[in-house]
Image: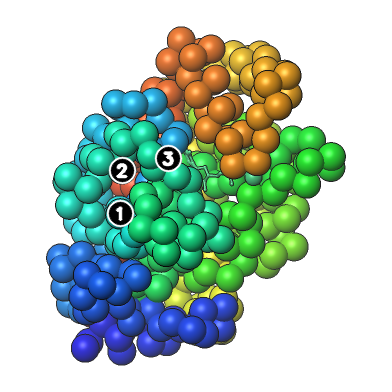
């Protein structure tokens, strides 16, 4: 199986129980099921980009999530790569969904939000779950996919000094060697603290044609980053070097939203009222991020929603470019 040898050097010390690509040819009874077209693309060393499902199932309002999920796959295809949306469908962790599965995971109301720790439970209970950035990165790596596009990463929540709420995305980034293309971290978070935690976990953060760390739906978070990259080939070279060194960390590529970004003043006001509302309603844990995103969408007259959709497409375009550059390297 050529994809196994292609993925071999990328084997991660963080994932000793599985090898990238190991599941690609298994049957529907395996816990990880890679769609046939995705497995074929990997076997042929063609570019593949993983997409997560939490952002479509819990980050966007219904029924819009299903439409965006389909459009995102089209954006990846237009960029010359094969899309692989990840979700737990009726007890199987699937990498690459059929249109019916994709639209069901975005539309059904019994779809849980699965971090890595929830995967075993969701699969054993034969339930449905959307995968977070962390769980998606983990599944992508297990399948042998090297590039993953999301919206904004999770990180350290504001008031984390009291709640200890830090997204599991952070520790996943520390142990999962994939390129994660995002618009920075969600600005509902404590962005400077999140950048500090990424440094603690040895996760490189690259600015896509910028040194200003993007703030999700605002163009600039106000934080600076050290490394600017200007091309997909440059990202591919850094990724290959990290892998050659045997480093298990992800590579974060942060893409600023240019057209259609949210006005920072509108953002701050809506976020302040959203945080108060969350506190008053006792919203905590994994419910907090979906609550704040939906609050923002409602209290910015949809401007944050439009920006959120625009940024995931921008990230998908860059991810496809990077996947093509990595595939070209292998050829
Ligand atoms: N990006 C978006 N919308 C989202 C997310 C990312 O544009 O809803 C999701 C990702 O799945 C990320 C999750 O992993 O939010 C973080 O949730 P938490 O803060 O509970 O870890
Ligand atoms: Mn959390």
**Image position, residue 112 (x, y; %):** 45, 44
Give the class, few, some or many, for how many residues have Cα within 10 Å of label 3's Cα (few <14, many ≥20): many
Numbered disc 1: secondary structure: strand
User: Which one is earlier in the sequence, the residue at label 2 or at label 3?
Assistant: 3
Q: Do the residues labelled 2 and 1 touch (CB within 8 Å)?
A: yes
Residue, far front? 125
**Image position, residue 266 (x, y; %):** 59, 13
User: Which one is earlier in the sequence, the residue at label 1 or at label 3?
Assistant: 3
Numbered disc 2: secondary structure: helix
Between 42 and 17, the one nearer to me in the picture: 17
Establish if 126 lies above or below 141.
Answer: above
Assign the N terminus to one quadrant of the image.
bottom left
Q: Picture quarter containing residue 191?
A: top right
Is there any visible trace of residue 151 in the rendered image?
yes
Q: How far apart are marks 1 and 3 (CA)?
A: 16 Å
Q: Picture quarter containing residue 43?
A: bottom left
Ligand 2 quadrant assignment? top right
Q: Which residue is drawn at 25% across and 41% down?
A: 104
Closer to viewer: mark 2 or mark 3: 2
User: Which one is earlier in the sequence, the residue at label 2 or at label 1?
Assistant: 1
Q: How far apart are marks 2 and 1 (CA)?
A: 7 Å
Establish if 95 lies above or below 222.
Answer: below
Give the class, few, some or many, for how many residues have Cα within 10 Å of label 2's Cα (few <14, many ≥20): many
Establish if 189 lies above or below 73.
Answer: above
Query: Quick check: is the Cβ at mark 3 less than 8 Å away from ligand 1?
Result: yes
- For residue 55, which numbered disc appears in the image? 3
Numbered disc 3: secondary structure: helix
- For residue 89, which numbered disc appears in the image? 1
Assign the C terminus to one quadrant of the image.
bottom left
């Amino acid at each position: 199986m050529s994809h196994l040898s292609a993925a071999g050097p990328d084997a991660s010390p963080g994932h000793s129980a599985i090898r990238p690509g190991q599941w690609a040819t298994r049957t529907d009874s395996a816990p990880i099921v890679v769609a046939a077209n995705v497995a074929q693309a990997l076997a042929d060393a063609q570019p593949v980009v993983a997409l997560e499902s939490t952002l479509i199932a819990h980050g966007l309002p219904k029924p819009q999530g299903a439409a965006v999920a389909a459009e995102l796959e089209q954006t990846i295809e237009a960029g010359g790569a094969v899309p692989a949306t990840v979700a737990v469908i009726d007890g199987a962790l699937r990498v690459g969904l059929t249109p019916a599965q994709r639209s069901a995971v975005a539309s059904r109301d019994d779809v849980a939000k699965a971090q890595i720790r929830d995967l075993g439970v969701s699969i054993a209970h034969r339930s449905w779950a959307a995968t977070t950035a962390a769980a998606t990165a983990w599944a992508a790596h297990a399948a042998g996919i090297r590039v993953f596009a999301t919206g904004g990463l999770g990180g350290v929540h504001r008031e984390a000094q009291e709640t200890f709420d830090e997204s599991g995305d952070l520790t996943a980034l520390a142990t999962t060697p994939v390129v994660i293309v995002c618009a920075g971290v969600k600005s509902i978070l404590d962005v400077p603290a999140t950048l500090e935690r990424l440094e603690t976990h040895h996760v490189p953060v690259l600015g896509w044609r910028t040194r200003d760390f993007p703030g999700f739906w605002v163009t600039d978070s106000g934080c600076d980053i050290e490394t600017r990259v200007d091309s997909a080939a440059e990202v591919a070279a850094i990724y290959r070097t990290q892998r050659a060194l045997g480093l298990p960390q992800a590579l974060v590529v942060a893409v600023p939203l240019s057209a259609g970004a949210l006005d920072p003043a509108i953002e701050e006001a809506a976020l302040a009222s959203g945080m108060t509302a969350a506190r008053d309603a006792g919203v905590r844990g994994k419910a907090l991020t979906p609550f704040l995103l939906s609050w923002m969408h409602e209290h910015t007259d949809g401007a944050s929603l439009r920006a959120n959709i625009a940024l995931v497409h921008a990230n998908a375009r860059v991810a496809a470019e990077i996947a093509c550059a990595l595939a070209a390297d292998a050829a």
